[in-house]
Amino acid sequence: MNAEINKSLKNAPAKKKKVASLDKRKARSGWLFILPFIIGFVFIYLPIIFNSIKFSFNHVIIQTNGGYKLEFVGFQNYSDAFLVDTGFRPALTAGLSQLVLDIPAIVLFSLFIAIILNQKILGRAAFRAIFFIPVILTTGLISQIDTNNLMLQHMTEDSINTGAASNTGQGIISAQQLEGLFRNMVVGGGFVDTVVKIVNNIFDIVNRCGVQMLIFLAGLQSISPAIYESCQIDGASGWETFWKVTFPMISPIILVNVVYTIIDAFTSASNKVMQYISSVYDSPNNGSVLSSAMSWTYFLIVIVIIAAAAGIISSVVFYQRRD
């Protein structure tokens, strides 16, 4: 009896091993890809974030033996940042007002350049590289080299002091020049000042639109050419095609670029608030804890602005169904 059972078990077909589906294998590969980031975030960034929050609610007392002790003070550092410190609120106001102008200008300019570079023109790849070069030149080691480049500073000062570029120190255009242009138009002074600020800041705007331009290009190239062919057959103009097809199809990309631009602008080293917080950190008399409170206050403001912008833009975003 046992022999027959053993024989039947041997002759029974072997169970097939379960093969993971393609989605599960992709998920595992994704987790493996981000594993270094997760390890670094948990063991490096999380302790730093925790210490920063803890320092923002304490005062540092230096001990005679060279160590330090933390004294809990609650929200005093946060109240000191707004009520005692005389520079944080002006820096915050100036930084936010500047970014209100820069962020829409960067997104719109990068979209405009991406649409042009998406056309079939001679030297398209070269033009794309030219617009992306400032992103490389203004980040990392090259940016540090330029800040210490005495020759570049000397050349800039000489160009400002020359008669041919006597207006460079005051900006490209002035409000008086635009008033003559808009004299016969019903345009308020606030609009003129806004245009002046954007034009005078055009160099910085061009430098900061390289990444957004590439993202827009990827979104534009993902639109099926068959849709544009249908528009041409129906007799739609270029203007109608842009607003009825191109703009809705890239609206998710606009949302991504707006969020990216907000984060990039608020965390840039040239940001006035970031510079002021860094200067407070280097100051004596609990400058480190006061700067921590300013940093977390600034962080909460950035989160609120991102949530508001994402909520407003998400209400008009069009997502194409791929059923």
Image (tube, grey):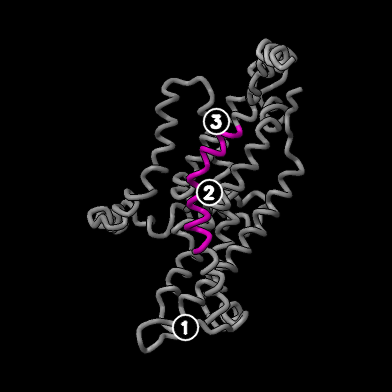
Q: How many labels does the image show?
A: 3
Taking the magenta stretch, the answer to whether it contains residue 166 is: no
The residue carrying mark 3 is 217
In this picture, is 23 found above or below 105? above
Q: Where is residue 287 in the image (x, y as percent from the top left)?
A: 46, 78
Q: Which of 57 and 229 lies nearest the eye of the viewer?
A: 57
The residue carrying mark 1 is 69
Q: Which amino acid does label 1 sit on?
A: Lys
Instruction: Answer left or right for 44 relative to 181.
Output: left
Residue at left offset 42%, top offset 72%: 279
Taking the magenta stretch, the answer to whether it contains residue 44 is: yes
Q: Where is residue 145 in the image (x, y as percent from the top left)?
A: 29, 52
Q: Which of 195 and 228 lies nearest the eye of the viewer?
A: 228
Label 1 and label 2: CA atoms lie apart by: 31 Å
How dense is the environment of label 2, judged by Cα within 10 Å: few (below 14), some, or many (20 and up)? some
The residue carrying mark 2 is 38
How dense is the environment of label 1, judged by Cα within 10 Å: few (below 14), some, or many (20 and up)? few
Tag 1 and tag 2, C-beta contact below 8 Å: no
Tag 1 and tag 3, C-beta contact below 8 Å: no
Quadrant housing residue 223:
top right
Badge 2 element: helix
Q: What residue type is labelled 3?
A: Leu
The segment highlighted magenta reads: 27-47
